[in-house]
Amino acid sequence: MSLLFDNRSSGAEDLHKKRLVQRLPMFLLNNFRQIIASLGGLWRTPSASFMTIMVLGLSLTLPATLHVLVKNVQSVSGSFDNASEITLFLKSNISDTKSRNLLARINLYPEVDSTQYISPKAAMEEFKALSGFGKALNYLDENPLPAVILVRPTDSNRAPEAADALLAKLQKEREVELGKLDIEWLQRLNAIVRLLQESVYTLGILLLSAVVLIIGNTIRLSIMNKREEIEVMKLVGATEGYIQRPFLYTGIWYGFFGGFVAFLVLEMMLWWLGSAITRVAESYNNDFILQGLSFGEFGYLMLIAISLGFAGSLFSVRRYVSQIEPSML
């Protein structure tokens, strides 16, 4: 008897799996039809759909623009980090031989990438050429300028904290009179960048929450407009999932088109500002180029927009569709 029941149980499981396999194509086909139908619903109300999509797109544009701003400021501050350089002023009574020995010792530092030695004579010649007091300096009895060593840290030691630690280490050399590393402005710039990042996160959360509320309210109005249709569908036995899916797909379409509009607006802004920023950079002999969204960042933007559309529509669908019940006369 147990063998007979085992055979019946396995047969029932096989039949259940077979039915699931047979239902899967129909389920996918119904979902595809609802996706197309929800897109058609947007097309049938072009004015309202266009206004909603534009509001969503502009709402997403601001956090995307702030992200691009922080990205470009970080690239600028990163280039300044890479240009950090330590200036060591040697004592005036140090001979050229001792200065060269110090230079050799500094080159052995693991934190140092390269060095440059500037003798007092070379420093005076450079000062004459740059200051415009060449003839007046000829009346000096002796050269007051000290020997200078320019130290360039390695890539891993060009950040403000690491470069400051290297400066403290170099100043312990007995031949060094004074070391100079002008990084206060760089630390301020990094603090501003961190402030911009926090501002992006704060404003981004607020604006993305607004996007969810806008989509949720739009879907709520759509549900109210189709109240009678939903009542009829429930009377004929339609499931909650079948009724809710078109509204969910509508929210996803809103998010998709809103994200694409945000991308287009952002690219237009970058194109408009790009030439002006390039001219400013050229006036400072800099080849800075304004960076836009990368392909991966564009994908993240679209994913966030679609997720927000789904979240807003899901909030309204779960709350309002279940409240609609057919009235029994």
Image (tube, rainbow, N blue to C red):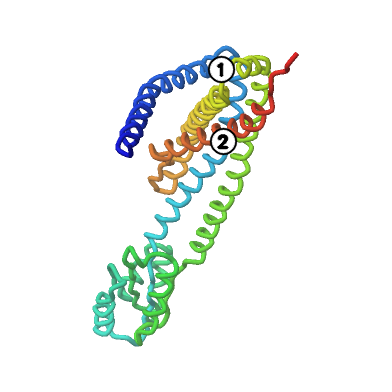
Q: Position of residue 104 (x, y in %)?
A: 24, 78
Vertical comparison of 248 with 2: above or below: above
User: Foreground: 270 or 232?
Assistant: 232
272 relative to 17 in the view: left or right: right
Q: Which mark is residue 196?
A: none
Question: Is disc 2 placed on a helix, strand or loop?
Answer: helix
Q: CA distance from mark 2 to mark 1?
A: 18 Å
Q: Is residue 215 visible?
A: no
The amino acid type of the residue labelled 1 equals Leu
Q: Quadrant of residue 225?
A: top right
Q: Residue at x 59, y 30 (%)?
A: 313
Q: Residue at x 43, y 22 (%)?
A: 27
Q: Is residue 228 visible?
A: yes
Quadrant of the image containing the C terminus: top right
Vertical comparison of 271 with 182: above or below: above
| The residue positioned farthest toward the front in the image shown | 1
Q: Residue at x 54, y 23 (%)?
A: 242
User: Foreground: 70 or 93?
Assistant: 70
Badge 2 crowding class, 10 Å Cα cut-off, few under 14, some 14 to 19, many 20 or more, is: many
Badge 1 crowding class, 10 Å Cα cut-off, few under 14, some 14 to 19, many 20 or more, is: some
Of the residues under marks 2 and 1, which one precedes in the sequence? 1
The amino acid type of the residue labelled 2 equals Ala
Q: Position of residue 320 (x, y in %)?
A: 67, 28
The mark closer to the camera, 2 or 1, is: 2
Q: Position of residue 29 (x, y in %)?
A: 42, 18
Q: Which mark is residue 42?
A: 1
Q: Quadrant of residue 236?
A: top right
Question: Label 2, on which residue?
Answer: 311
